[in-house]
Amino acid sequence: MFSRRLPESLPENALTRAAGARRASGKSLIDLTTSNPTAVGFDYSAALLSELSSARNLIYDPQPFGQIAAREAVAADFARRGTPVPVDNIVLTASTSEAYGWLFALLCDPGDDVIVPTPSYPLFEWLTKLASVVSIPYRLEYHRRWAIDVDALAAAITTRTRALLIVNPNNPTGSYLTRDELAAIDRVAPDLPLIGDEVFWDFPHDAAPASRVSVLESTRRLVFSLGGLSKSAGLPQVKLGWMALGGAPDAVAAARDRLDVIADTYLSVSTPVQTAVPALIEGGKAIRAQILERARANLGALGRVVAGNPALELLRLEGGWSAVVRVPATRTEEQLAVALVEEDGVLVHPGYFFDFEREAYVVVSLIVPCDDFARGVDALARRF
């Protein structure tokens, strides 16, 4: 009856069961996995959403790529980052996930494949399956910093590969794409479109390389940079993402013509959100500053805990909201995570959730309130 793109069942794993039982018992649980900025005590101005009630929203004027004023605001934000994009090359979507779906429809036929990074957030498996596309992994390697294994990336390309995906900075490794990496990647199949997920771009840490670079600076014929208000303004609830096109003018024009058909078919971005985009981007600066301040404070606290415990290693983090800690492999990652929930009341992500090549790692969110974060990482450290 149902599509084979979906699993027949989704059984709960041991960690999910343990966390559910802890919550059901009424016992406290420090959640070091939360990535929802609206649920961790940041100061959101009530006026931030005032434009959503504008009388202008009573008029429906559908534009496949989005209203021009909204796209101009997004283009201005790219210019702020140092990567100017013509407003004609900005396409609004309801989310980054939707942008991926549109790009897979643009670039791939059923059964084609795209090259995706690992370790990384486990989103691509589902997005590609739902689009009838195959995801083929290439690895990031850690040698004092996370970096792309360019040889492995080149070896992963098949005759049916239609795009290369980069998360910049990666989630959860927090590694930015560097200028040298981009140059090396651009020498590999230069006609292959490059998709860069740059939603965490605005959250650099002290270790961020001076040579970090946006995919929009690629020399490839066709490049897409994805972003959205969910991360850049801490507003996941307003549901607005975007893509910026770059590359050779003829390739960009051909992609834009075809994207127009896709965008016009869905027309998924609401009028109120589009009307509010300039105000949301401007108001989001204050939220972004709060998120970055807390992430840096928690990263510093984590660094001090790890420095006092030789059994732990904090892997270099260049940007984003997550941190990776290597722990002794005295038990499986899942067993450790379950024990932390049941015995310490602390929830962390085990490394296998992100497809790390080997054990043992845990991943923690840096946007958790500082007091909770400190108690949670102290409990983790006491186990070793």
Image: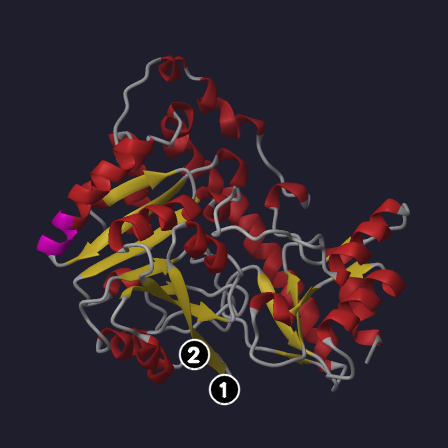
Which amino acid type is shown beneath numbered disc 2? Answer: Ala
Query: Looking at the image, which residue sits at the far left?
Result: 250
Can you see residue 195? yes
Residue bearing the label numbered 2: 147
Answer whether labels 2 and 1 touch (C-beta < 8 Å): yes
Residue bearing the label numbered 1: 143
Horizontal side of 87 relative to 267 (left or right) equals: left
Badge 1 element: loop
Query: Is residue 250 inside the magenta stretch?
Result: yes
Residue placed at 39% from the left, 50% from the top? Answer: 131
Q: Position of residue 81 (x, y in %)?
A: 33, 54
Q: Position of residue 377 (x, y in %)?
A: 76, 67
Highlighted range, magenta:
249-254
Residue placed at 79% from the left, 75% from the top? Answer: 381
Q: Is residue 282 above or below residue 366?
A: above
Can you see residue 167? no
